[in-house]
Amino acid sequence: MRDLWLRLRAVALAACCLVLSGSCANEDVEREGDDPGECDDGADNDSDGLFDCDDDDCAGAPVCGGGDADGDSDSDGDGDSDGDSDGDGDSDGDSDGDGDSDSDGDGDADGDVPGEWVTVRAGTFTMGSPTDEWERSGDETPHEVTLTNDFAMQTTEVTQAQFEEVMWYNPSYFSRCSDCPLESVSWYEAAAYCNALSDLAGLDRCYDCTGGGESVVCRPSESYSSPYDCPGFRLPTEAEWEYAARAGTTTATYNGALAGDPYECYPDSVLNSIAWYHCNSDHGTHEVGTRDANGWGLYDMLGNVEEWCHDWAERYPVGSATDPWGPETGLHRIERGGSWVYDALFIRAAARPRFTPGLSRHDIGFRPAKSLEL
């Protein structure tokens, strides 16, 4: 049923039967707007190939921006024809005059997408772990990394409600918690969601995808030489992720070094306030944002669900790096942050799990990012 729904949506609801309700449009209707609600119901009620406000039959309806008495061509009563009611002369719905649809003045349309976002400023940090960090792995060689672009990052992992609102399905195993992080999602599905956000914001896509739903397959767009160059939404690079997770700290977690034996299953005093992991999760995910954020306002950067990153996995360079994003090809994509499944030794800012991009598990999710000032 869900696959059928996705196929119908992909052709812009061209079929008259609505899958969820089983109802069909009235075949005797001759005009799109003859009955209440027909101008915004997503159906082609008069079978002329035009939907709702794209149909001339609905052009004067209030829902389509007409039908007021102020002498303009919209229905907001402000005397201009921009389609909003803020009087600033643009049609973005905010009042900053920058022509986008949010109120942050940055000139993009990220106000159209779900979630709260923070701006992470460019900078330099030490990526990896020091040789004396408890239970570090050999692939965590410390090295200096410089990120030259500011970027936006969602403050929480993508929730089930956010994903379903945009993608119209929910693959999660723990599906009775709309504010819990989405999980059971492949790298490909995460990339497709980022593309959908780019579409909502009127930005170029960062991934080339084929198929849809749980069968989608994606790869980085060939239109850009690196993920940093793409203006749309995408998965954070591994370097961006660790930089954001550390938030200026240098210890195993952004709340300090691990306090106890990472093999012992008891709530670690350092982790317990910031992360859901094996010793306090009760064998499942929890609502996002219910543990303490790091210093940059990001929640659940450790624990709850692991987070897909943009990069293919590879060994770190011996020297410093600027704007790294992994090799062109590979077998495994990087995941970061650990999850409700893991013991404390994996809930570290430097830990680097990796999995095949088609894998989906009950503890794998993601959060999107976007380059700024391009």
Image (cartoon, grey):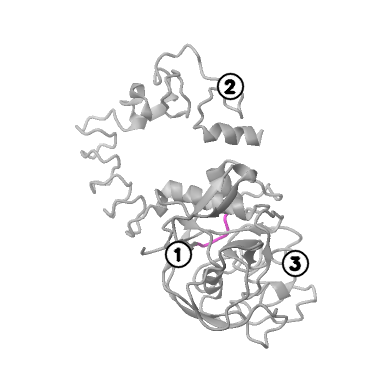
Which quarter of the image is occupied by the C terminus?
A: bottom left
Residue bearing mark 1: 228
* Kind of element beneath mark 1: helix
Foreground tag (3 vs 1): 1
Which quarter of the image is occupied by the N terminus?
A: top right
Whether 157 is among the magenta residues is yes
Q: Residues within 10 Å of mark 2 (few under 14, many from 20)?
A: few
User: Which residue is drawn at the image coordinates 70% and 78% (left, top)?
Assistant: 137
- Classified by dominant secondary structure, the portion drawn in magenta counts as loop
Three-letter residue code for mark 1: Tyr
Residues in magenta, as a range: 154-159
Whether 280 is among the magenta residues is no
Residue 369, placed above or below residue 49:
below
Frontmost residue, 76 versus 362? 362
Residue 257, placed above or below residue 64:
below
User: Which residue is drawn at the image coordinates 56% and 68% (left, top)?
Assistant: 326
Three-letter residue code for mark 2: Ser
> Who comes first in sequence, dot 3 or dot 2?
2
> Who comes first in sequence, dot 2 or dot 1?
2
Locate residue 348, reporting x and y percent: 65, 75
Foreground tag (2 vs 1): 1
Residue 145, placed above or below residue 97:
below
Q: CA distance from mark 2 to mark 1?
A: 46 Å
Residue bearing mark 3: 278
Left or right: 27 with respect to 204?
right
Whether residue 263 is visible here, answered yes or no, is: yes
Whether residue 286 is visible here, answered yes or no, is: no
Residue bearing mark 2: 23
Q: CA distance from mark 3 to mark 2?
A: 46 Å
Locate residue 340, reporting x and y percent: 71, 63
User: Which residue is drawn at the image coordinates 35% and 31% (left, top)?
Assistant: 64
